[in-house]
Amino acid sequence: MPDIDIFTETGLRDALPCLLMAEADYMSLSMLEATSEVQGLLVVIYHNLGMKAEEEGAFERYTQSTRLAQAFEENPADPEATRVWDIITVIGKTLVSR
């Protein structure tokens, strides 16, 4: 990884491609907490660079991923997974009782 001085405007601009790549990678892996952390950092960097449109876009993505993460926290198991687990539990109990 290149040596980036994050305390200068040039350093912030140089960090953007790495952060955008991390955001895309975390999204594709469904790592919502990591995605929202990168998006929050992007909001701050875009703000510090005066890139208002990009800041608003990153904030919107941050808001969406945060809401999605909250939804998963509130409803941790999807109904199909719960149904499959219930069937596996019944099968396990049947096998154990033999």
Image (tube, rainbow, N blue to C red):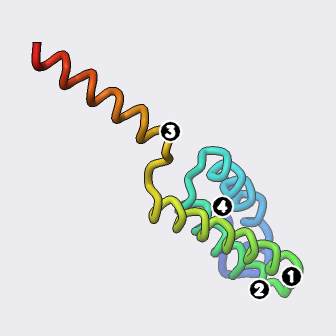
Q: Is residue 17 above or below residue 56?
A: above
The residue that disc 4 covers is 3
- Closer to the chain start, of discs 1 and 4, is 4
- For mark 2, what is the residue? 47
Of tags 1 and 4, which is closer to the observer? 1
19 on left or right of 33? right
Residue at 50% across / 39% down in the picture?
Answer: 80
Residue 77 appears in the figure: yes
Label 4 packing within 10 angstroms: few (<14), some (14-19), many (20+): few
Sequence-first tag of 1 and 3: 1
- Say which amino acid is labelled 4: Asp
Say which amino acid is labelled 3: Glu
Q: How far across and how far down the image is residue 37, in percent?
A: 58, 68
Residue drawn at 77 percent across, 85 percent down: 47
Cα–Cα gap, marks 2 and 1: 6 Å
- Label drawn at residue 80: 3
* Residue 87 image point, x, y percent: 35, 28
Q: Nearer the viewer, mark 3 or mark 4?
A: 3
Quadrant location of residue 41? bottom right
Q: Earlier in the sequence, mark 2 or mark 4?
A: 4
Looking at the image, tell me whether mark 3 or mark 4 is earlier in sequence order: 4
Decide if residue 86 is on the left or right side of residue 63: left
Q: Is residue 5 visible?
A: no
The x, y position of residue 54, in whole percent, is 85, 75
**Which mark lies nearer to you, 3 or 2?**
3
SS category of the residue bearing label 4: loop
In whole angstroms, how far apart are the C-alphas of marks 2 and 4? Answer: 23 Å
Mark 1: few/some/many CA within 10 Å (<14, 14-19, 20+): few
For marks 3 and 2 on the same chain, the one whose residue lies earlier in the sequence: 2
